[in-house]
Image (cartoon, rainbow, N blue to C red):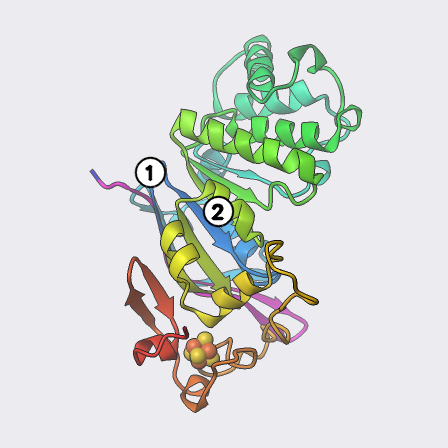
Amino acid sequence: MNKKILEIKDLHVHYLTDGYTVKAVNGVNLSLARGESLGLVGETGAGKTTTALGILGLVPNPPGKVIKGEIIYNNENLLRKSDAQMRKIRGREISMIFQDPMTALNPVLTVGAQIAEVIRLHEKISAGDALIRACEMMRLVGIDDVRHDEYPHQFSGGMKQRIVIAIALACNPSLLLADEPTTALDVTIQEQVLDLIEKLRRERGASLILISHDLGIVAEVCEKVAIIYAGEIVEYGTAGHIFDRRAHPYTRGLFDSIPDFSRKVHRLRPIEGMMSDPTKLPEGCFFAERCPYAFEPCRKIVPVFEPEPGHLVKCVLVEKGKAPQ
Ligand code: SF4
């Protein structure tokens, strides 16, 4: 039996706007086993959300376009599916938890009706039975089901995100995509929501891709980590290896910019500079303009994945056996 549930091969996604081509995703390769959790980490604009939208077949076209690649889900290429086929897969097999619950929920429908709607979309079930299931889902995410006929504005931010999670899990999907699921929440609620996602994922055996810019959150939840920069994965491996033996200068920069309360420092160490303009990506390594280790070959040679113990790294220095220490 193939243990892989998802394999993304050489995915390229562009947005064509006003005569410019925004190269948002540039050859992403990823794989995910059944029941596994993967953190997709990078700065804003790195291509995390576009990759997730590509998996769901939701890249807005126009202006977005999948230029090439394959997204193999359960041995079938999702990029060859029709819109009607993708509608059946979305919500039932692959679900997404969006960043902002306020925009993900319909303000004029009760929360019970919104959960039941997803269930009825994918299953032949009466309205009454769908509402019973919706109430079960509300209890599962820790909300009293007597509130099923209340509207989103009657719930707090954390409660709304729980409703979004209930909707995403209502049809027992095999793959869950969570796009910055706690960014819009208070810090005190973030922990609860993460625990809930992880608990439900484990109970139901679903695979998870957690999209985040926050390495702390990824460390809590994910078994594997992929670091994405300017639309390409630059480091990929088990969480243990990435956290303990990070080798790519961008990954090191991300870790260095995390506040360390055990040391007294005057300033944080951010990664200098801005991400490359996606309409004018440089030749060679996309990180060269910001990389403290850059040397001449970096601006000419396109790095390829090199194996480091337990993980893969895309860096010319690593290729030459001179990984930054
Ligand atoms: Fe830095 Fe060169 Fe490695 Fe790119 S290839 S990350 S510029 S050392």
Majority secondary structure in the magenta region: strand
Task: Identify residue for label 2.
Answer: 219
Locate residue 51, reporting x and y percent: 50, 55
Per the image, label 2 sits on a secondary structure element best described as: helix
Q: Which x, y percent locates residue 248? A: 43, 69
Q: Residue furthest bottom?
A: 296
As drawn, 309 above or below 320: above
Around disc 2, counting alpha carbons within 10 Å, would you say few (fewer than 14), some (14 to 19), or many (20 or more)? Answer: some
Q: Residue furthest right?
A: 153
**Marks 2 and 1: CB-CB under 8 Å?**
no
In front here: 310 or 202?
A: 310
Q: Earlier in the sequence, mark 2 or mark 1?
A: 1
Callout 1, which amino acid?
Arg
Residue 305, percent from left and from top: 33, 69
Magenta residues, as a range? Answer: 2-30
Q: Which residue is at a point 38% across and 29% down the rendered structure image?
A: 205
For numbered disc 1, what is the local secondary structure?
loop
Q: Position of residue 315 (x, y in %)?
A: 39, 74
In this picture, residue 94 sits left or right of residue 167:
left
Amino acid type indicated by mark 2: Ala
* Quadrant of the snapshot with the C terminus: bottom left
Residue positioned 47% across, 49% down in the render: 39
Q: Can residue 29 be seen in this view?
A: no
**Closer to the camera in the image, 69 or 212:** 212
